[in-house]
Image (cartoon, rainbow, N blue to C red):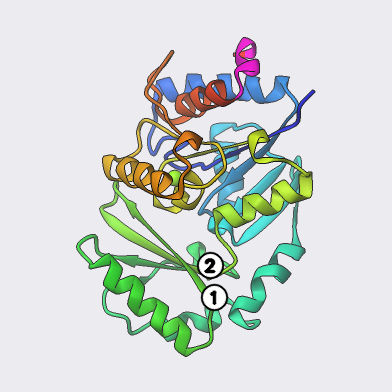
């Protein structure tokens, strides 16, 4: 049997922002599919591990083998309710911030026009998160933050996304070596998997690095038009068009969990009979 690693974003990808009957049906199918095959399941989220656990309970999602939380800044190995932080990952990304954590560096960015520090619950050891107004000049803001980071000898990864439901932009500052893609590659290495044994599902800006990478990926049909255009453009530029499948609704509507299933069927046709 082939081992596969299925990596799925949560909010806006596997689960909708509000109640959606279609999506709950698809989630049950997803759980059945995962349980029947030799699949390692990783949730890949901007949430911290407590909020990931909360959403797993709330939606009765299948128990994951791994959780990549804080947009890639932390990785947990999971055995039922026993989750263990993979310290080695922090040892790998920590030097980019010279041993400092998010709370130590927040002050460097506090005066940046437009940036508003997110609530404590959204901050992680290696994830510093801000809100920004939608109308902000994104490239000027990112350039400015990058400059500030440089002044303080911080090597950073900037992850910008838009919460279309709340009409606000989100900026996550991570160590340069940390993002969703780097964390997934770390897991692949751990499990000795090749790209064709992996699938990623996502819906928004903080998924862009994986959506436009060499890893097979599915963009769910509910993704915003601007995300779809950007993902297709970036995948094309990187030469990975064939590795980005945009769900359109084959058996269902291609939204949320149904889109994730559509992606699994597209890349792993041998799993079709199980659905
Ligand atoms: Mg999402």
- Quadrant hosting residue 65: top right
Q: Is residue 185 magenta?
A: no
Q: Do the residues under discs 2 and 1 have CB atoms within 8 angstroms?
A: yes
> Residue 49 placed where, x, y %?
61, 54
- Can residue 236 be seen in this snapshot? yes
Label 2: few (<14), some (14–19) or many (≥20) C-alpha neighbours in 10 Å: many
Is ligand 1 less than 8 Å from the beta carbon at label 2? no
Q: Please report whichever mark, 2 or 1, sits nearer to the chain's N-terminal start.
A: 1
Q: Residues in magenta? A: 268-274
Q: Residue furthest top?
A: 273
At x 55% / y 59%, what residue is drawn? 179
Circle 1 is placed at which residue position? 102
At x 57% / y 26%, what residue is drawn? 267
Q: Is residue 211 above or below residue 268?
A: below
Q: Is residue 17 above or below residue 238?
A: above
Circle 2 is placed at which residue position? 127
> Residue 108 placed where, x, y %?
44, 85
Q: Quadrant of ligand 1?
A: top left
Q: Residue furthest left?
A: 135
The quarter in which the C terminus is drawn is top right
> Residue 269 placed where, x, y %?
60, 18
């Amino acid at each position: 049997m082939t081992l596969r690693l299925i990596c799925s974003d949560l909010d806006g990808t596997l689960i909708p922002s509000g109640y959606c009957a279609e999506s709950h049906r698809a989630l049950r199918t997803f759980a059945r599919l995962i349980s029947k095959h030799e699949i390692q399941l990783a949730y890949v989220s901007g949430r911290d591990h407590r909020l990931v656990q909360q959403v797993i309970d709330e939606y009765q999602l299948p128990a994951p083998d791994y959780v990549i939380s804080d947009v890639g800044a932390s990785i947990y190995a999971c055995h039922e309710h026993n989750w263990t932080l993979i310290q080695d990952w922090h040892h790998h990304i920590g030097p980019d911030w010279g041993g400092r954590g998010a709370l130590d560096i927040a002050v460097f960015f506090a005066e940046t026009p437009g940036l508003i520090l997110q609530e404590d619950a959204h901050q992680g050891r290696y994830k510093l998160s801000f809100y920004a107004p939608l109308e902000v000049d994104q490239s000027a803001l990112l350039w400015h933050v990058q400059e500030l980071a440089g002044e303080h000898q911080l090597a950073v990864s900037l992850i910008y996304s838009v919460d279309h439901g709340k009409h606000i932009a989100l900026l996550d500052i991570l160590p340069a070596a940390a993002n969703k893609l780097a964390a997934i590659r770390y897991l692949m290495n751990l499990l000795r998997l090749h790209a064709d044994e992996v699938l990623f599902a996502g819906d928004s800006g903080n998924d862009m690095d994986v959506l436009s990478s060499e890893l097979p990926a599915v963009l769910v049909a509910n993704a915003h038009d601007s995300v779809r255009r950007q993902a297709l453009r970036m995948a094309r530029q990187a030469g990975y068009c064939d590795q980005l499948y945009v769900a359109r609704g084959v058996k269902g509507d291609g939204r949320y969990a149904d889109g994730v299933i559509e992606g699994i069927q597209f890349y792993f046709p041998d799993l079709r009979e199980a659905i």
